[in-house]
Every structure is written in C-alpha cells, then in structure tokens.
C-alpha cells in the first residue's frame, strides 16, 4: 500500500550549498572566492527540513558544527543521509552534541551502501550511550524505495545516481532535495511530480562524471517541472550573481542560510540575506 505524502507545511533551511572543497577555495583569488557577498561563501552541502513538528537533518558534512552554531540549530529528530562521501558524512561526530542535548539516540536513515559505511568507518556511533553521552549514538534504519512514516510525517527516499553509485535524494511533502546527481533513473521521475520546490545539484559549468553541470541541471529541472528550483552543491566556479542572471524563470541560486517555507494556505516564502521573492 502506498503511503500518502505529508500535506502540511514544510520548511527547508540550507545549512550549506558548497561542493567538497567549499567556497572560498583554499588559495584561490577568483571573483567568487574574493567576493564580499555572503551568498558566495559556501560551506559543505547540508540542509534541515522541518515538517509536522519534526526536524530532519540531511547529511553531516565537516562544517556541521559551524553551520549549527550559525543557525542556532539545537535539536534534530532524525538524520537522512544521501551518500557516504566525506563532504556528506565526515561531520558525523558533531551529532554527539544533539544526542547529549536530547539524551537520546538519533534515528538515522539511508540505503545499504550508506549504512555499511557508517558501520565500517564509524562503528563507535552504534554503541550504547555512556553516562556522559560523549559519542554520537545512532539507530540505523535501512530504506529502499518506499516511503517511511516518521512521527506521522512521510519521508520518501528518491533513488538517484552519483556516477555509478546508487544514492538517495529525499522528498517530504511538496519539497525534494537532490544533491550529487549525475542521472535520474526513470522510475524516480514520477516520484518528483507536483513539487513546489526542488533543491538540485549544480556543480559547475563543465560536465562532470558524477554531478550535473549548469546546463544539465537546467535541463533536468525543466523535465521535473517544480514550481521553483534552487541550485545547490556548487563549486567556486559559479558566482552567485552571474549564475542568477542566466537561470530561466522559476530557478534560483541557493545560498547558505536560505530558508524556504511552503504551506497549504499561503504562497511559499523565502528568507535569508537579501532573499529573492518567490511567488507561485
């Protein structure tokens, strides 16, 4: 039986929209890296999705502590992982702060590829908590292609390809988050119908074997047909204003700290430094 999608409000906070190297890139003096515009400063890609009173963290990159301090993120109900590359996983130790604050283990969702990396590389996260909560304490939940109910909120894994790796995007209600995408399997396209907001991988101008280029991202976004597409996971080669000017209507450039809220009874709202106005 197919689980119905969450129908309430969804809020997304972009913790980071950068690629594995972040922006500014170490030692680089390009226009993006030397920009004074905060929207050109990009920590590693991660996001928070809030729905139904639950807070879902997508990925734990190496900038998680910095991002959580910046956004005053003090509570996480569950972690949704996309894939096990370092820029999406290696901040896993910073989950211990949430476990300590909440005095509880964190439910953690991913496919078998993802969970096997946690089991092999970070086995101490699967131990019982000590009295000090000095390590992350995770409860691993393997997902396939079917939606999962979490405290009344339907979270839907979306299978995508990251080069040869089968990894996951996530959909909650009318919002989907797809990072590190090189191709979308045909079976996943119907799962992305009727989106209000799509967050989509957009690495650089030149094509890449495991990511979407700008033109590929525009093409896929057009095919999916969300009311608004927000480009994420960008290298320093993509300057905020330059890329913004060339994107078609209905597509914008994401930035660290951008927040988008959707609901049943109002237009979607976007906030953040000099936030663009979104009308649907």
Image (cartoon, helix red, strand yellow):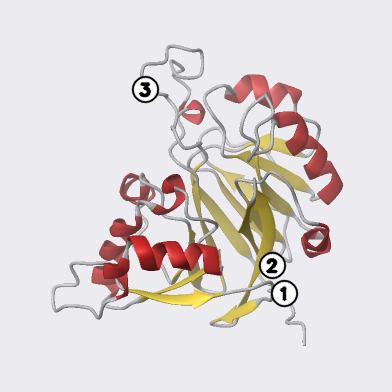
Could you tell me if the residues under marks 2 and 1 are in contact, i.e. CB atoms within 8 Å? yes
Q: Position of residue 7 (x, y in %)?
A: 71, 73
Could you tell me if the residues under marks 3 and 2 are in contact, i.e. CB atoms within 8 Å? no
For marks 3 and 2, the one nearer the N-term is 3
Residue in front for this viewpoint, 28 or 257: 28
Crowding at dot 3, Cα within 10 Å, few <14 / some 14-19 / many 20+, comes out as few
Q: Position of residue 2 (x, y in %)?
A: 77, 82
**Tag 2's secondary structure?**
loop
The N terminus - image quarter: bottom right
Residue positioned 38% across, 68% down in the render: 119
Could you tell me if the residues under marks 3 and 1 are in contact, i.e. CB atoms within 8 Å? no
Residue in front for this viewpoint, 125 or 227: 125
**Tag 1's secondary structure?**
loop
For marks 2 and 1, the one nearer the N-term is 1
Q: According to the image, label 2 marks what residue?
A: 173
Q: CA distance from mark 2 to mark 1?
A: 5 Å
Q: Residue furthest bottom?
A: 1
Q: Position of residue 33 (x, y in %)?
A: 45, 19
Q: According to the image, label 1 marks what residue?
A: 5
Crowding at dot 2, Cα within 10 Å, few <14 / some 14-19 / many 20+, comes out as many
Q: Is residue 245 above or below residue 88?
A: above
Instruction: Classify residue 74 by image quadrant.
Output: bottom left
* Disc number lying in front (3 or 1): 3
């Amino acid at each position: 039986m197919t689980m119905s999608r969450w129908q309430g409000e969804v809020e997304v906070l972009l913790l980071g929209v950068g690629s594995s190297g972040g922006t500014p890139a170490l030692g680089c003096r390009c226009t993006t890296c030397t920009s004074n515009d905060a929207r050109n400063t990009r920590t590693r890609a991660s996001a928070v999705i809030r729905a139904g009173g639950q807070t879902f963290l997508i990925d734990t990159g190496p900038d998680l502590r910095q991002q959580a301090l910046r956004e005053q993120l003090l509570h996480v109900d569950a972690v949704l992982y996309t894939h096990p590359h370092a820029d999406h996983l290696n901040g896993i130790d910073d989950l211990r702060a949430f476990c300590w604050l909440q005095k509880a283990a964190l439910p953690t969702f991913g496919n078998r590829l993802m969970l096997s990396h946690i089991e092999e590389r970070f086995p101490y996260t699967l131990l019982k908590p000590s009295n000090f909560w000095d390590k992350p304490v995770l409860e691993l939940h393997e997902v396939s292609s079917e939606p999962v109910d979490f405290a009344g909120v339907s979270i839907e894994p979306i299978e995508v390809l990251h080069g040869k790796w089968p990894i996951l995007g996530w959909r909650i209600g009318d919002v989907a988050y797809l990072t590190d995408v090189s191709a979308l399997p045909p079976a996943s396209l119907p799962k992305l119908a009727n989106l209000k907001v799509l967050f989509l991988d957009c690495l650089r101008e030149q094509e890449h074997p495991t990511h979407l280029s700008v033109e590929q991202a525009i093409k896929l976004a057009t095919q999916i047909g969300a009311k608004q597409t927000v480009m994420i996971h960008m290298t320093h080669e993509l300057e905020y204003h330059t890329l913004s000017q060339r994107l078609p209507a209905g597509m914008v450039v994401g930035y660290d700290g951008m927040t988008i809220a959707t609901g049943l009874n109002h237009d979607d709202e976007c906030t953040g430094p000099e936030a663009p106005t979104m009308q649907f």
